[in-house]
Amino acid sequence: MTYRNELVVDDRESGVFRVHRSAMTSPQVLADERAQIFDRCWLYVGHDSEIPKPGDYVRRTVCGRPVIFLRDSAGTVRVHFNTCTHRGATLCREESGNTRVFQCFYHAWSFDTTGRLIVTPGADAYAAGFDRSALGLRAPARVESYRGMFFLNHDEHAVSLLDYLGGTVEYLDLVFDQAEEGMRVVGGTHRYSVGANWKLMVENSIDGYHAPTVHATYIDFVKNSGGGQNKAALGTGAGVDLGGGHTVIESTAAWARPIAYWEPFFGEEARPEIEAKRAALTDRYGVERGTRMAETFRNLLIFPNLVINDVAAITVRRIEPVAPDRVALEAWALAPHEEREGSAALQRRLDSFLTFLGPGGFASPDDVEALESCQQGYAAQPDVAWSDISRGMSRIPLPDDELQIRTFWRAWASVLDSAGFPDRVEGVESPGTTRTSAPAAAGAVRS
Amino acid sequence: MSADLATDTALRSRVEDFLYAEAALLDEWRLDDWLQLLSEDARYEVPSTDRPDGRPDTTLMLISDTRPMINARVTRLNSRKAHREFPWSRTRRIIGNVRVLAVETDGDLQVTANFAVYRTRSGRTHVYAGRYRYRLRPRGEAFQIAFRRAELDQENLDEHGTLSIIL
């Protein structure tokens, strides 16, 4: 099977883009994804601010593989596979903590934070050929970082992380440069899973088209709280193919941002502080870049499964495939170090995060409902085999067009076909196919 | 808990009746009536599952609502466009182990209780289990809710996907 044409139809001559829904239901597709995508691409593990001190660790499962993300006793950040090299028991069984030694509960083999095997009880029972130095904790083939964000790669021949991130670096910098003392992950994780294929969560995370319908209640809430006044935001911005499967929607902020766009939602008392932050950004980075950092929304996808949404707050969302019809999510809030614990600024940011995002927010639950309803349809309706993702092919893409979703799918299919990443799309994908009049529809109801 | 409070079965009984009545309003989706139980400065919190001790000014919570946000949450849930709850799920709240822990100097009661909230929708039932922490303000024979917080035992919301109801 080839993924291009058979599962992803990219007909630029006609301006039609379709995805076969078996891509969301087939166990074989997920097996191929694990081998071709998740074993070869850079996968986000965590941010070094989660493990600030030597010996700090957190457990994480990265695309099915349990790992320990830690800072060793000398201060170096590392990733170990969380399995004892003796007989395979789970080595670290606490979610997070600080330690100098990981001792396996099964037979007490013990490892230091660098992964070295330091204790095998009853060492005199082993013959001369037993090489303790070869039985240290195993690690992924590659671990690299950018701005404190650590990624792993199972392919030792992979390009460097920086090369892989490519065009996303500009957008990551726009996020991380907002902080004067650096960004940190705030404690508290949104952990939930959804009865849908992981790619539906990817699509949803970079989909501007669904906001007015799925999030009508959130938009009403924003208006009722004196927000959404930035009329200039309407219809601005663009979806951009960043190359390498990465993509972003950038648009003028439609409502308040902790850094740094004030609206009444934040309260009058917060206004001077937020406006001072905005002025500081302009001083530091110039009017153009400072304004862009302060007053634009960014929904960034780092292929294949990391989303950074810099909107009413900053969320880092890791998308973890579990089964064809199940995806697990972990989401964190990113905040500048200078927004101290207990400060009004941090609480404002977190409140702003929660109104929209997360399992208890005013918006994310409705996304989950949409995704599960799609997935149920794919399983129950095999006669309706294709999803359409053509919106905006005949024009310079707007934020509510679907270029960014097509960007993901083009990369997905090409990588699965072992053809590498496709060329970046710039400009109009299907010029000359613009509709000049609406199609006649029999029995159409006029509103 | 002082010995007096532990043996004040009349007070505990009144608190239990109040919590049961509140649970009934939520189970019956009488959310506007439920709002009447809250003080004007009421807060409603649910910490993240990995930080049950989390505080809203230091930690990413699942829910951290001021009174205006609680009102907005109810407005949303009463609309036909809160898709995760349209149509509404069926919920059943079981509340037990109610204890009055302390009486504050201003007269507010510190109350804790265990809960199991069953939510049924689209062919599935899942349970939210945990502990409530309340601050109840005496108003005649009844109470006003000044603070309510639901701390979940679940380590994640893998079964639930969302927290779209009011716990």
Image (cartoon, coloured by chain):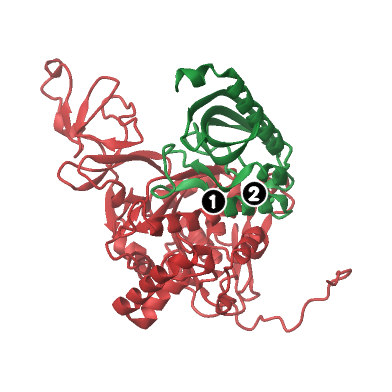
Q: Nearer the viewer, mark 1 or mark 2?
A: 1
Residue lying at the far right of the rendered structure:
A443
Expressed as whole percent of the image width and height from the top left, the position of residue A276 reads: 36, 73
Relative vertical location of residue B82 with respect to residue A133 in this rendering, above or below: below
**Residue B152 appears left or right of A221:** left
Expressed as whole percent of the image width and height from the top left, the position of residue A383 reads: 74, 51
Q: Which mark is residue A106?
A: none
Badge 2: chain ID:
A
Q: Quadrant of residue B165?
A: top right
* Front-most of residues A194 and B99: B99
Q: Is residue A296 visible?
A: yes
Relative vertical location of residue A186 with respect to residue A139 in this rendering, above or below: below
* Front-most of residues A210 and A14: A210
Residue density around tag 2, few if under 14, some if 14–19, many if 20 or more, within 10 Å: many
Expressed as whole percent of the image width and height from the top left, the position of residue B22 reads: 66, 35
**Residue B33 appears left or right of B46:** right
**Residue to which mark 1 is pinned:** B66
Task: Kindly identify the amino acid type of the residue bearing the numbered disc 1.
Answer: Thr
Expressed as whole percent of the image width and height from the top left, the position of residue A312 reads: 49, 63
Q: Quadrant of residue B21?
A: top right
Shown colour of chain B: green
Task: Kindly identify the amino acid type of the residue bearing the numbered disc 2.
Answer: Glu
What quarter of the picture does the N terminus of chain B occupy?
Answer: top left
Shown colour of chain A: red
**Residue to which mark 2 is pinned:** A369
Relative vertical location of residue A339 with respect to residue A73 in this rendering, above or below: below
Q: Secondary structure at mark 1?
A: loop
Badge 1: chain ID:
B
